[in-house]
Image (cartoon, rainbow, N blue to C red):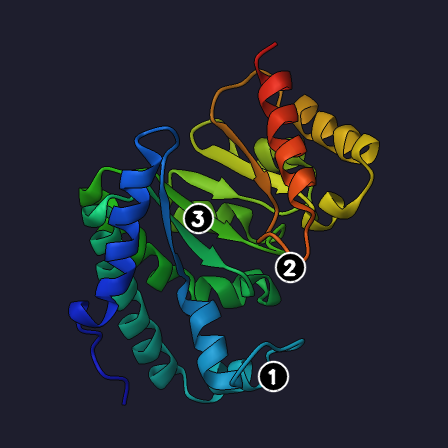
């Protein structure tokens, strides 16, 4: 059985947030994050990353009661973990569901969405922006919006303007540069960044970001050039 997570066991995370907040001196916001229930459950069940999530789905289908107990426990731990990050100084939090795109809309609705909703409902008292992000989620966007979050993060597999059309204007949107583009020549990076900002238009409620985590070996000078370019183009 999974043991309850004791707050003191993760004190080093909260200490790191306080140190980072002090070093930042308010120059930029500090974002906390946690893995989402499905992604965490898949690591627990598969023992690592997976292409097809066979064991995860087998468990989900063959033992639905046990699956929901696991997801409920993960959801409640995540709420406490993210609340503690906010108390330590995080000014926004992101729920990171890297592998939820492996699910069909029906499976997401039945096996995942209720537990994600518990998390976002539990975070409402923090009064901070909550980002709901997943990859490969072009078939799940509306269901993710229903689950919660003041911002929906999207990856590069869907055009930003299409994601905005489907999500509506009552939720902010984040994305969606392919992280591999940061390995490209600067002129190609500029072309891709301009395309995303053009799709975003001048409507409020947009956060430029990568469509997933930054990759090992990414040239730091390209990251800085991208940041500078976004600031330059956004100020026009």
Up the image or down, 197 lies above or below 177; here it is above
- The quarter holding residue 78 reads bottom left
Give the structural element (helix, strand or loop) at label 3.
Answer: strand
Q: Determine whether label 2 and label 3 are within 8 Å by CB.
A: no
Give whichever of 65, 7 is nearer the camera: 7
Please indicate whether residue 95 sits to the left or right of residue 108 in the image: left
Give the structural element (helix, strand or loop) at label 2.
Answer: loop
Within 10 Å of the Cα at label 1, are there few (<14), some (14-19), or many (20+) other Cα atoms? few
Q: Quadrant of the C terminus?
A: top right
Q: Quadrant of the N terminus?
A: bottom left
Q: CA distance from mark 3 to mark 1?
A: 25 Å
Q: Which mark is residue 132?
A: 3
Q: Is residue 70 visible?
A: yes
Residue at the far top: name it: 236
Q: CA distance from mark 2 to mark 3?
A: 23 Å
User: Residue at 62% of width from left, 47% of height from top?
Assistant: 155
Q: Earlier in the sequence, mark 2 or mark 1?
A: 1
Q: Which residue is mark 2?
A: 216
């Amino acid at each position: 059985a999974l043991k309850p997570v004791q707050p003191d066991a993760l004190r080093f995370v909260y200490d790191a947030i306080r140190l980072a907040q002090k070093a930042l001196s308010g120059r930029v916001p500090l974002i906390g994050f946690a893995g989402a229930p499905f992604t965490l459950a898949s690591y627990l069940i598969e023992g690592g990353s997976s292409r097809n999530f066979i064991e995860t789905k087998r468990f989900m289908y063959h033992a639905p009661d046990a699956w929901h107990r696991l997801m409920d426990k993960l959801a409640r731990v995540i709420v406490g973990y993210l609340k503690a990050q906010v108390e330590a100084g995080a000014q926004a939090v992101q729920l990171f569901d890297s592998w939820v795109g492996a699910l069909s809309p029906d499976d997401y609705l039945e096996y995942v969405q209720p537990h994600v909703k518990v998390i976002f409902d539990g975070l409402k008292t923090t009064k901070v922006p909550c980002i709901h992000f997943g990859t490969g989620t072009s078939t799940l966007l509306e269901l993710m919006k229903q689950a919660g979050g003041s911002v929906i993060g999207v990856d590069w597999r869907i055009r930003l303007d299409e994601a905005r059309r489907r999500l509506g204007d009552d939720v902010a949107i984040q994305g969606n540069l392919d992280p591999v583009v940061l390995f490209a020549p600067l002129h190609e990076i500029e072309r891709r960044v301009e395309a995303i900002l053009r799709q975003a238009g001048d409507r409020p409620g947009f956060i430029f970001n990568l469509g997933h985590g930054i990759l090992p070996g990414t040239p730091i000078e390209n990251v800085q050039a991208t940041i500078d370019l976004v600031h330059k183009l956004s100020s026009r």
